[in-house]
Structure formats: structure tokens, C-alpha cells
Image (spheres, rainbow, N blue to C red):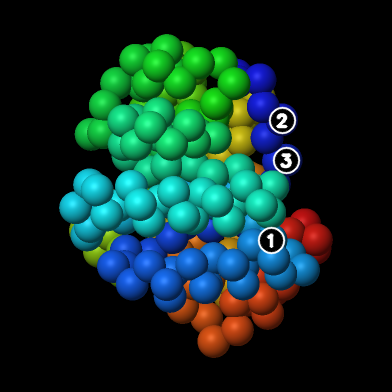
Amino acid sequence: MNGRLLPACGLYAITPDTSDTPSLLARCRLLLHCAHPPALLQYRNKCLPPPERQAQARAVQALCRAANVPFIVNDSLALALALEADGLHLGQEDGDFAAARAALGAQRILGATCHDSCQLAQQAAESGADYLAFGAFFPSASKPAARRASVDVLRTARARFPHLPLVAIGGITAENAAPLLDAGAHWLAVIRDLFEADNIAERAAQYAAIFAAE
């Protein structure tokens, strides 16, 4: 477990793939400075070449720092280290978890994609992951081919890994999120339902109400 104090629960915002940096920054600014900002924000971009991606990520990171929201980099250990990000999220094909833990050091966050498998979660936990992400629980536009997970995996993981936060991801909306919290998720990872909302602040408030009701 790293030395950072992780939020106990909350919204885990993940940026959408876009080359329109001004629009992305405007949406991030609205989210980070609304009445109910996310617990964490992950920078994810699969469409930009590395130099542009680093520049975009650095701009998002600056907004996160100003709002005191932990900034997590998706997939790239090199980018996380270059930016001195607060943490890194790795998928199962994105590198060795133990090596990433060693490179990041004890003070940075390391998250792991575990799909629908507590076995993968066990391996990630043993390698130093600070949180475990499961999904997709619903059809996901960002990962349409992602295999689906049952809410039962959250119940099993909550009992098996009581010391680690669990993240639910994949097609989550404010309308379908509550059962995931009931099953054991601590954080809800959301892309489209948040960043494509007509009113980002109102959508964030809806998620805050869901957490408050649990």
C-alpha cells in the first residue's frame, strides 16, 4: 500500500479520447471546480501521438493539482514518471505490476484492471496494487469488446480484499450505478456519462447523491 491517503469512496473520472485539448480542458475545469469534484481523475488517451499526448496530459495535470485532485495516468509508466503523476493505472497487457510498483515508489498510487477475475486481482494485490478495478459491467462505448463482469465479482472481491478499494467500470451511468455500490464498489469509474453530459456539474451532483445514499 502506498503512503498516500486514498479517498474512501467517490467518483473516478476518466478523460475521453480526444484531440481537442481546449474542449477537454474546459470540461475538466468544470468538473474539478464543481460542488462535487471527483475523488480521482485518470488521464486516458489512445488517439494522440506521444508528444501531443504528453502536452495534453500535463495541462490536465495542472488543473488537477490546482483542485487538489489526484491525477492518474492510464497505461503508460513512462508518461506517469515523466509527469511525476500521482499514480498509474495498468491494464493486464500494459506492463508488469511489480516493476511498475518499484518504479513508482511507495508514495504513488498504482491501480490494476482485473476484468472479472479475482485471480488477477490477487496477483495485482500481491504486486503492490493500491486499488482493483473490475468490469465492464455494462456495454461500454470506449471498450466495446470488453468482456462483461457480474456484480457478484464485487461481492467476492470485497470479502477477499477488505483492505483494498474496488473500482467498478464499464458503461456506468447515474441510472445504473447504485447496484454496483451495493455489491461492494468503492469508486465508480465514468467517462462518457460524465464528460458528455449536458451539464457536467449536475451530473457530478447526481453521482454524489448516489454515494450519499449508500
Label 3 to label 1: alpha-carbon separation: 14 Å
Residue 204 lies, in percent from the top left, at 66, 70
Mark 1: few, some, or many residues within 10 Å (few <14, many ≥20)?
A: many
Amino acid identity at mark 2: Leu
Q: Nearer the viewer, residue 174 or 205?
A: 205
Write the residue at 58% across / 56% down: 63
Label 1 to label 2: alpha-carbon separation: 17 Å
Q: Please state if 56 lies on the left or on the right of 152 as rendered.
A: left
Disc 1 vs disc 2: Cβ atoms closer than 8 Å? no
Q: Which residue is mark 3?
A: 8
- SS for callout 3: loop
User: Can see residue 92?
Assistant: no
User: Can see residue 197?
Assistant: yes
Write the residue at 60% across / 43% down: 70
For residue 37, which numbered disc appears in the image? 1
* Rendering quarter of residue 95: top left
- SS for callout 2: loop
Q: Is residue 22 above or below residue 159?
A: below
Q: Quadrant of the N terminus?
A: top right
Q: Is residue 200 above or below residue 59?
A: below
Q: Which residue is mark 2?
A: 5
Disc 3 vs disc 1: Cβ atoms closer than 8 Å? no
Q: Please state if 36 lies on the left or on the right of 94 as rendered.
A: right
* Rendering quarter of residue 123: top left
Amino acid identity at mark 3: Ala
Amino acid identity at mark 1: Pro
For residue 111, which numbered disc appears in the image? none
Mark 2 or 3: the one toward you: 2
Write the residue at 35% across / 52% down: 55
Q: Nearer the viewer, residue 125 or 161?
A: 125
Mark 3: few, some, or many residues within 10 Å (few <14, many ≥20)?
A: few
Residue 28 lies, in percent from the top left, at 54, 65
